[in-house]
Amino acid sequence: MFISEMEMTKKLAKHTAYQFTSFQTFETMPLLKKDRISHKPIKNMVVTRKVTYKNAGIGYVYGKSVNNKRRAENNDHHFIPLALPWGQYVTDSKTVIENRGKYFLRVALWNNTTADSEYYLNGKRVTKTSVLPILKAIPKKVTGSKRQDLQVVNERKVIALGISKITSINLSGKHYVIDDVNAIADKVDKLAKDNARMKAMYLDKTTSKENA
């Protein structure tokens, strides 16, 4: 099911039940003109990263969880969690955070949560090692807002991910594709097809020369 980024933000903000989910994020790294260390020009290096999260939790409210446990133990002392280090919750669901006009999904990562990354260079899938020099050259202040840690609670690590980077998500038994950022994936697919076509043309020319 296709859905816009704003519609998904509203749906997530209304989400109150805690559930496990899986989703994908897609991020295009800032295009650098020069390497910060060697100062050598970096040309035509478009690096994109796709991360697939599985068994992540949304709708998790730490304070509510603690108080439920205390009530079960006949402890009447009400626990009040600390305020957010930045931003503010959009609704009482505490699923979506707004900060300077941008929206973030509050996610609880468990021990069994997986986050598998894939890297692409100009649309072609590559290893992280091959693009590591480019990743290291990107200023931390640029990438720092993409994933921000909020707190560590027992075996859970609670983070915030930019909703604008999410391309698909499973929510309440339905699979949603966010078409606003899906256009980015289409560009990468086009680059991959162009690379494959150029490679095929090169092989055809090489074969023709060998047969001549």
Image: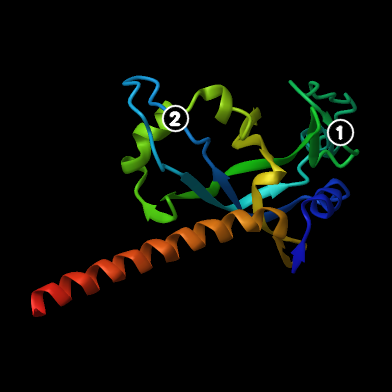
Q: Nearer the viewer, residue 26 or 37?
A: 37
Q: Tell me if residue 131 comes above or below residue 3 in the rendering.
A: above
Spot occupied by residue 60 in the image (x, y as percentages of width and height): 76, 42
Name the element at disc 1.
loop
Alpha-carbon distance for marks 2 and 1? 62 Å
Tell me which amino acid carries mark 1.
Asn
How many tags in the picture?
A: 2
Q: Residue at x 23, y 74 (%)?
A: 204
52 or 165, which lies in front? 165
- Residue 153 in sight here: no
Binning the other alpha carbons within 10 Å of mark 1 as few (below 14), some (14 to 19) or many (20 upward) gives few
| Residue designated by label 2 | 33
Horizontal side of 170 relative to 192 (left or right) equals right
Q: Residues within 10 Å of mark 2 (few under 14, many from 20)?
A: few
Tell me which numbered mark, 2 or 1, is placed earlier along the sequence.
Answer: 2
* Viewer-side label of 2, 1: 2
Name the residue located 37 percent from the left edge and 68 percent from the top edge.
197
Q: Position of residue 88 (x, y in %)?
A: 83, 28
Q: Which residue is mark 1?
A: 74
User: Is 11 above or below relative to 158?
Assistant: below
| Element under disc 2 | loop
> In which quadrant is the N terminus drawn?
bottom right
* Up/down of 137 relative to 26, above or below: above
Where's the C terminus, which quadrant? bottom left
